[in-house]
Image (spheres, coloured by chain):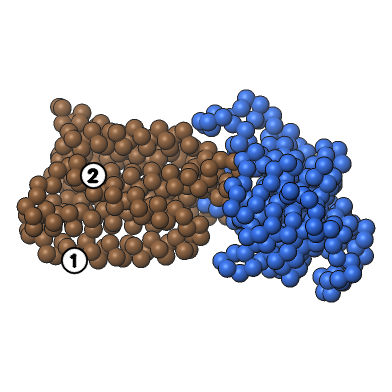
Chain colours: A brown, B blue
Amino acid sequence: MSLIIELTCLSILISLLAGFSSTYTSISRSGFLVVTISHAILASLAVLFYIAYIFNIYVTPILTWTIMLITALPVCAFVSHVRLFSERDLILSIIFALMLSIAALFMAILPGFMISRMWSFLTGSILLVSPMDMTFIFIICLICSTLYTLFYREFLLVSYDYEYALATSIPAGAINYLLSILISISTLACVYVLGLFVTYAVMLIPGAVLVNARVRPSLSIFLNILIIFITLMISIMLAFKYNIPPSGLCGVMISILAGLAIFLKFLMKRFKKTQT
Amino acid sequence: MVIIAVEELKVSIGGRIVISEATFAIREPSLVVVIGPNGAGKTTLLKTLIGLIRPVRGCIRIFDSIVKPGSKYPKSVRKLIGYMPQRDVINYAAPLTAREIIVSGLIENISVPRILLPRDSNDMVLQIAQRLGIESILDKFFDELSGGQQQKVLLARALIKDPKILILDEPLSNVDEISRVEILELLRDLVRRDGKTVMLVTHDVEIAMNWSDYVLLVNNGRAVLYSSKMVEDVDKFLRHYPEKDRKIIPSRSPYCA
């Protein structure tokens, strides 16, 4: 029973983080940032595990979280200074390719028992999250959700009209940086719990679909949190019943839901066209 | 009284000098039309005036505040200026309504945290929308609006904080003739009745001739202010840039002393 409560709490925390981030990621066109940060984390963890193996160090959760933060923050600090989307995406794609290569390189030379630990960052380990990790995720969720809420108007402004924001007396540059940091930290927590692949699904798809359907940002945040929470809970229940990885199920469900939503929109558009 | 003064201003972007010498002063509320060929540096000049680009040399004076190379652009000055950027810098991915965009112009007037809007914000939006004739489109999404309507929404956002100076970058592009006259009448009204100073960039020589109090001609990296009554043929100015008519305002003036 306590495991179910624990998993429900974890799902709420992850839904909050991913729900907020998904909307802001879509509006600020930071999808590439999410992909790059998650691969940078993978590369840094691969290097960390290799060093730990060579020097026989025990990799504690604190060390893991610290390394993930140290990797993520410089990347978003660097790219938040680039104003042009095309330039930013180019820089991110270079970092992404470099980090993926480093990850592949180090994962190839890691011993088998460590590969399985690395694998959990790809596929997720929602059922194996320790109390220490829960505490970290709770703190991250509290900080991120509070800041996402408090700076709602500022984040929207820098996302849709950065030039105008710079011309006002609000610190637009700092707010843009803060948004990148919050998206990166949320990505980090999602990768830790849900794994790399599902992080894309929860952090990119629901927000993008809702923004595409012209749902207003505040409602989009609420709907994202709800959708991610429900799919996570259903995935966990099915995982218990059929012994399948919950993260994978969650990713599949969100992708199918998104596909259905887009198909529905297409049908409605066709229907409206035939009506006129 | 000096509203905007620029003295021996030099601006470069990425090592390329865009404005090599600009000196002018606006001393009374006026409608100033900034005109010049493409790539002449009109937008750069406006962005320098609002502090988005730092000058290399010279100075800018806005009322009593002076901005020099290396000095920080004062926040108090930003609150006095309403800015309308070109429409193409806006990220259309954000599903925001016209109302939400206009309200975002109030962001500076809201105390931190800015999550809660002032109680009278709806009235303020409605008032400004009525003045621009866009009250019926307030709840439509920005990307669903026509080019002219989008321009009016952005103008409303610049106006809502009641600035003393309005700096508008091509506010009349993609605007139909009727709306164009409406906007120009409103701008002239803002100058005459409300005592605001409006600087707008346009490519339309006719607007410069018929609507402006001053024409700020930007060409070959230089910017010179003319009284519009003295400009008979702006086309001729753009082509020949006659030396004899240059510098109505003396270049060595004590604006930034």
Secondary element type, mark 1: helix
Could you say which is closer to the camera, residue A187 or residue A126?
A187
Percent of width and height locating residue A270: 53, 55
Looking at the image, residue B216 lies above or below residue A213: below
Q: Give the letter of the chain under mark 2.
A: A
Q: Is residue B88 above or below residue A148?
A: below
Amino acid beneath label 1: Leu
Q: Residue at x 44, y 47 (%)?
A: A177
Residue that carries the numbered disc 1 in the rendered image: A105
- Looking at the image, which residue is at 73% across and 64% down? B21
Q: Which residue is mark 2?
A: A65
For badge 2, the amino acid type reads: Trp
Say whether residue B257 is left or right of residue A126.
right
- Give SS at disc 2: helix
How packed mark 1 is, by other alpha carbons closer than 10 Å (few <14, some 14-19, many 20 or more), is some
Any part of residue A94 in sight: yes
Label 2: few (<14), some (14–19) or many (≥20) C-alpha neighbours in 10 Å: some
Q: Position of residue A235 (x, y in %)?
A: 23, 42
